[in-house]
Amino acid sequence: MTASAAFPHVPAAPVDLRPLGVVDIGSNSVRLVVYRGLARTPIPLFNEKATCALGKGLGETGVLNPEGVALALKAVKRFAHLARRMNVGKLELVATAAVRDAWDGRDFVRALERVSGLPVSVLSGEQEAKTAALGVLCGLPDADGMVADLGGGSLELVMLDQGRFGDFATMPLGILRLSEASDNSRVRAVDIIDEHLAGLPWIPKGRGRTLYAVGGAWRSLARVCIEQMHYPLHVLDNFAISRVEALRLIEVLSRLSRKSLESIQGISRKRLPHLPMAAVILERLLEEVRPETLVFSVYGMREGRFFQNLPPEVRVQDPLISSCSELARSAGRFPEHGEELMAWMAPLLPNESVEQARLRRAACLISDVFWSEHPDYRADQAFHRVLKLPFMGLNHTDRAGLALTVYYRYTSEGTDDWAMRAASLLDETRLKRVRIIGHALRLGHTVTGGAPGLLGRSALSAKDGVLTFHVPEDDPIFLPEVFGKRLEKLARAMGLEPKLALLPPAAQA
């Protein structure tokens, strides 16, 4: 089976275009996220958080923080009214650890339902753990290893085996609860964490695999790591580092002053007091689980609820290809041209893997969505947009490769500093492939102007050190003066000599 046959193009299924909203009533904050319809990728239309600290003092009193209850009721009332104005098709109110564990949780739920006019789902520990894992699977369908979701009131752990659920646990090790239980003592916190982890005999199953870190506090830690490493991509989702490097960076973080932390862009001042405890929890997990790699995910419980609402036929779509197809339909001039480009350049890249074909298809699909940018800045704008768009199912190397492919589709010799930094993530073999695909896209679009139905009348072949472009004889569209230099650039990228071959009318038919 060829790579192209193994990964067929599946037209996007019709979806409910009305927004879906999720109100996440957590131990520290209450947040509303409104997603743009039930397409494969959860694109937020609106995202607002109210810090309520419902779980403050819960470990000692057993009840919700009264001040937090008042704040949460006001926030949920606002969110419900906003959602109606936004024509949200479905608004889900979901409560987690603090509400689940508090003696007065049921009374609070009834109050929430009165002010919102909607039912509230209080997730069990198992439901919370698996919903967070579903959020990771929403972006990485084949995720394999352990998902760790850190909130204000609890820590959830779930084993994933190539996308399937395994062992799970929920523990009262959220940042707020652990800080209070340990009186912010690192030594005491470590003892409490270790006591809970010791009760999980399946922890060794995570060794040598991947630990997926979910939660706002750990996303803030990821920003610190990116800053300390001078990492070339300032993208949080799927930022990955080795366990050894992660432990080294956590040790560095412990020595940073508050002023140094405040200078790091993207870290909320409200999160700063919680970073040391978040680091302690992550450190103990890394030391006990001993994964090979730590991956930070920006998707968690809310995206898990979104994923649960998707129709089955949409849920099984590839998240990257679905996003690129949607982007091509909404922003491209001739969306069908992407699949034509995919088939047209295939002879240049024989024996590619299924994953290589997937990434090439993504590049072909979005290769013309930046046509409206000013020509002088088109390559740079396309690169930065692709680098930072909320594409799912991409690790950082793949993201850099996709952005650079589209970059070379618009320019032969790039000089953008960030593009050069992204290129440092790729080895020479990968970088050569990226340039070949980018130059092939540039040639294909130059020949046809992006119009569909034309590329199939020509053909590319590479043999005996020569790149041959077979074009119809006496067809005014295939004018060598227009595309000659583009053909030379593609041949040079492949280390071949360019050649133009004319197809007689009989061969064209």
Image: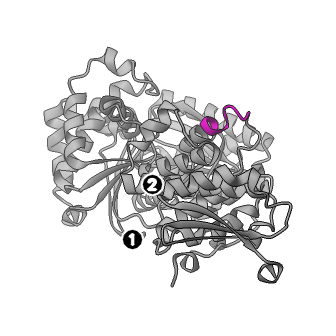
Q: Position of residue 334 (x, y in %)?
A: 80, 57
Is 140 placed above or below 65 here? below
Q: Which residue is mark 1?
A: 162
Mark toward the viewer: 1 or 2: 2
Name which of mark 1 and mark 2 comes first in the sequence. 1
Residue 51 pos. (x, y %)? 50, 30
Drawn side of residue 473 relative to residue 170, left or right: right
Q: Which residues are magenta?
A: 374-381
* Local crowd size for mark 2, using a 10 Å CA cut-off: few (<14), some (14–19), many (≥20): some
Which quarter of the figure has residue 462?
A: bottom right
Residue at (62, 64) in percent of width and height: 499
The amino acid sitting under disc 1 is Gln
- Whether residue 42 is visible to the viewer of this picture, yes or no, is yes
Q: Would residue 495 appear left or right of 362 to someone viewing this image? A: left
Judge by depth and name the residue closer to the eye, 101 or 26: 26
Residue at the far top in the pictured view: 259
CA neighbours of label 1 inside 10 A, class few (<14), some (14 to 19), many (20+):
few
Question: For numbered disc 2, what is the local secondary structure?
Answer: helix
Q: Eyeballing the image, is 202 above or below 419?
A: below
Q: Position of residue 32 (x, y in %)?
A: 61, 41
Q: Which mark is residue 432?
A: 2
* Nearer the observer, 97 or 169: 169
- Structural distance between the alpha carbons of marks 1 and 2: 31 Å
For the question of whether residue 316 can be seen, the reply is no
Q: Residue at (34%, 31%) from the top-left corner?
A: 230
Image quarter (top left, top right, bottom left or bottom right) of the C terminus: bottom right
- Check disc 1 and report its element: helix, strand or loop: loop
Three-letter amino acid code at the position of disc 2:
Lys
